[in-house]
Amino acid sequence: MLRPVALAAALLVSTSAAAVETMRIAMGDVASVQLRISGPGLSFGADSEEAEFLPVAKGEARVRRRGAAGLEVNGAPVVGDAVRFRAVLEGADGGAPLSAPIKANGREVRGDVVVRVLRGRLQLINVLPLEDYLAAVLGSEMPVSFPAEALKAQAVAARTYALQKKLEAYGSAFHLGSSVLHQVYAGMAREDPRTRAAVASTRGQVLTFELAPIEAYFHASCGGRTESGAAALQRDLPYLKPVDCPCSALPASRWSAQVSTAELEAALRFDSAGLRPAARTATGRVSRVAAGSHTLDGAQLRARLGYTRLKSLAFEMERTADGVRFTGRGYGHGAGLCQWGAKALADAGKGYRDILGHYYPGAELQQLY
């Protein structure tokens, strides 16, 4: 049974549920000194919930950087280094106005959009309800064709991860980025009826440990056994421990990559002759490679060769005529929820609560709002 969490976390942001549910997502810097914002009933004001918003003619704004840290909207200077946009539709039969999507720099999003000057560039920040954010994240982070229970498990993990990062970033201009470094977020383009259903059916549910949201890391595939948080992420957390996983039987868990000698030595930055795994973690993932007297951290090698090429550190190496063939299992760092494993468990009849309990042992599923 779910029980309310004693929210030290929520108290950091507000006592109102609406504020707790709001996220600020950085959508990336814009190289140009100008960008366009558009939407029905577009208005702008200061970057504050209590700001007075003024209408924008024809529902389109050209935002330009003015000097080193200033801004102008449609040619008129604005006060401060940030401006917030909101789009609204008139309510039916005289009802309250309804929030409408905004198009910012070619991306359509829900909620408000903030443009700010950051190190001489323009930065976009999407301010939107957490549940709307999650519906788009889920469509980017997990195939929407996966079973409903797997999608629900991912929704809870993503909600928990977002709230934990919000607490970590308290007082900052934004809580999370929109790339793979945090959670992939591409706006409304990645929403789907199945992602919205998974988010709605788990609304407000989070994973906690000692009454605080956990660091709910996840990855595509572990290859048969997840990794500890300490080994994968340098996060020695009691709920990120290795567990067996059914994804090993799935084709998605196997991969290979051929790397030429020139590419390999560019990544190693030393001679690759005799290259071998020099150390492995308890789950068999390569933590260090060596050639002669030279060594390199396994995670650094993966980063330099590319995360989509060297898909995990659970690999073997074979010297070939023109380089090295890596043969491995899994995709990602391996800690926390395994997405393909969640699919396999859901296909076997497991519910999302059981799936979460399997991948985050010791964490509790609780009702935040």
Image (cartoon, rainbow, N blue to C red):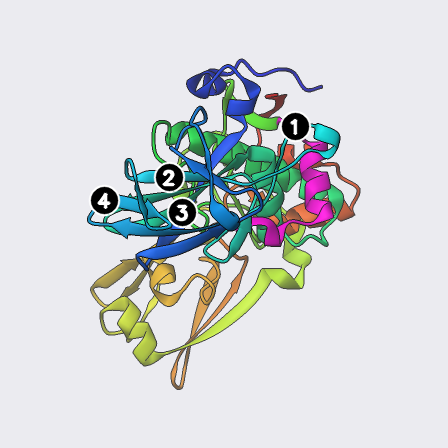
Specify the segment rendered in magenta. 183-204
Q: Mark 4 or mark 3: which is in front?
A: 4
Q: Which residue is mark 3?
A: 124
Disc 3 to disc 1, C-alpha distance? 27 Å
Mark 3 against mark 1, which lies toward the viewer?
1
The x, y position of residue 89, in whole percent, is 63, 39
Query: The residue under label 3 is which amino acid type?
Result: Leu
In front: mark 1 or mark 4?
1
Residue 287 can be seen, yes or no: no
Q: What amino acid is at disc 2?
A: Val
Q: Is residue 294 left or right of residue 280?
A: left
Residue located 57% across and 50% down the image: 141
Q: Is residue 356 visible?
A: yes
Quick one: SS at disc 3? strand
Q: How many numbered discs? A: 4
Q: Which residue is mark 2?
A: 83
Is 152 located above or below residue 322 in the figure? Answer: above
* Membership of 188 in magenta stretch: yes
Rendered position, 150 above or below 92: below
- Between residues 126 and 282, which one lies in front from this camera angle? 126
Name the amino acid type tagged 1. Ala
Label whose residue precedes the other's in the sequence (2 or 4)? 4
Residue highlighted by disc 1: 96
Q: Earlier in the sequence, mark 2 or mark 1?
A: 2
Pick whichever, 38 or 319, lies toward us.
Answer: 38
Q: Label 3: few (<14), some or many (≥20) within 10 Å? A: many
Q: Which mark is residue 261?
A: none
Spatial CA distance of label 1 from label 4 is 36 Å
Marks 2/1 in contact by CB < 8 Å: the verdict is no
